[in-house]
Amino acid sequence: MKKLVILLLFLGFATLAQAKTNPETTLKTVIPTLKDSVVIEFGKAGRIVIMVESLADFEKLKGMNINQIIAELGVQENKGTGEITLIELQKKDGSVKEVVSVIENGAQTEVRVGRMRIFVDESGQDTRVKIGTDSNTKEIIEFNLDDKSSPDTTVKIEADSNKIENFKDDLFIDLGINNFLQDGSFPSSDQPYATKGWGSWNVGINWVGSQRLSESWRWNFGLGFQWYNFKFENRDIQAIRGRNQIAFVERTDVTGTKSKLSASYLTAMTLLEVNLGKRKDKGLVLAAGPYVGYRLGGRSKFLYEETASSREGIERINTGKYLENLRYGIRGEIGVGKEIRFYSTYDLSSLFKEGKGPALNPITFGINILLD
């Protein structure tokens, strides 16, 4: 089984090499009509097949020395490692470069074709084949063609645990809590726009592409949608459109049950990521970079109960004309692997246009979840 796999793989590489060397040459397969053959078996599985088509060819064969034929093939074995060199190139400076070599170690065999590595392991119940290069990128093909108890052939393909992809893209969801910073600190509770953490949600969905720069560094870039809600701590405060700016009014005619300000953005971001772990799928990951967004909408929402009848009501006001259309800031991430990470964003731009509202810089803390 092992020799069949190696033979098929080797023939495939040989054909590709021939096609690259002579791209304009038409490959032709010639299948002769066999008249007779001589089979010489040796060792456990060694076999030499000599095919002849006429009696005259057979007479010439009898005059040949089989030991001389094998010696002229130039197949060399390293007695210490068991490595057999099948093809080698001798450079002008006299150095030798191995092109194709085979190393056998019991039930395990390694075939090297240039930088390509083919590992065949028949030590277990199933035959395992690893195909890769000198780096850690490998694919594992596991199959069991020798299991006669099952009429079906089972093929399993999985990624190596140390596989490092050059480029990948994923979908992520942001779930966070928002607040404001005013002059570097959170607004005090006596301010009308002071927010309540629980209920001031940030929800986002991002497509993120990731390009490998080195073994530990990646460049991430993404595009997505972000929704921001700022729930006021004082439920009687309503954000309304004043004459020239946003106004925060305390309602005394009704009892407020919920009051908030919301905005949505189309956002683009780019981050530089470093993995500090030895296992790149489980290592500590740090990422940071800028983002920029364009506002899609903005409004305030006020829920209340009428004092006399206890009837519930809701008022929605478009406050987008006082919000900055362009937002920009810094995003940071920390986590293990990529499935779940903690993130934080800080807007360097103000939420409101200059002169249209207080100078508030939104800040967010949350978790970033990978969507499979």
Image (cartoon, helix red, strand yellow):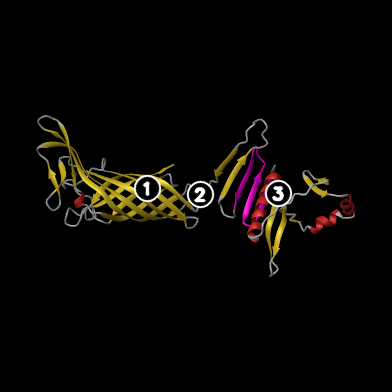
* Main secondary-structure element of the magenta-colored stretch: strand
Q: What residue type is labelled 1?
A: Asn
Residue 122 shown in magenta: yes
Mark 3 or mark 1: whose residue is earlier in sequence: 3
Q: In this figure, which residue is indicated by the disc labeled 2?
A: 279
- Tell me which residue sits at (20%, 44%) in the image: 300
Left or right, residue 251 beside residue 337 = left
Q: What residue type is labelled 2?
A: Arg
Q: Specify whether residue 232 is in view.
A: no
- Tell me which residue sits at (65%, 53%) in the image: 13
Q: In this figure, which residue is indicated by the disc labeled 1?
A: 206
- Comparing marks 3 and 2, which lies closer to the viewer? 3
Q: Residues within 10 Å of mark 1 (few under 14, many from 20)?
A: many
- Comparing marks 3 and 1, which lies closer to the viewer? 1
Give the numbered dot on residue 104.
3
Between 190 and 294, the one nearer to me in the picture: 294
- Comparing marks 2 and 1, which lies closer to the viewer? 1
Mark 2 or mark 1: whose residue is earlier in sequence: 1
Q: What residue type is labelled 3?
A: Glu
Residue 221 shown in magenta: no
Mark 3 or mark 2: whose residue is earlier in sequence: 3
Magenta region:
107-132
Label 2, label 1: how far apart the Cα atoms are: 26 Å
Residue 263 vertical placement versus 85 (above, below): above
**Residue 248, percent across and down?**
14, 47
Please state, as top left, top right, bottom left or bottom right, where the N terminus lies in the image: top right
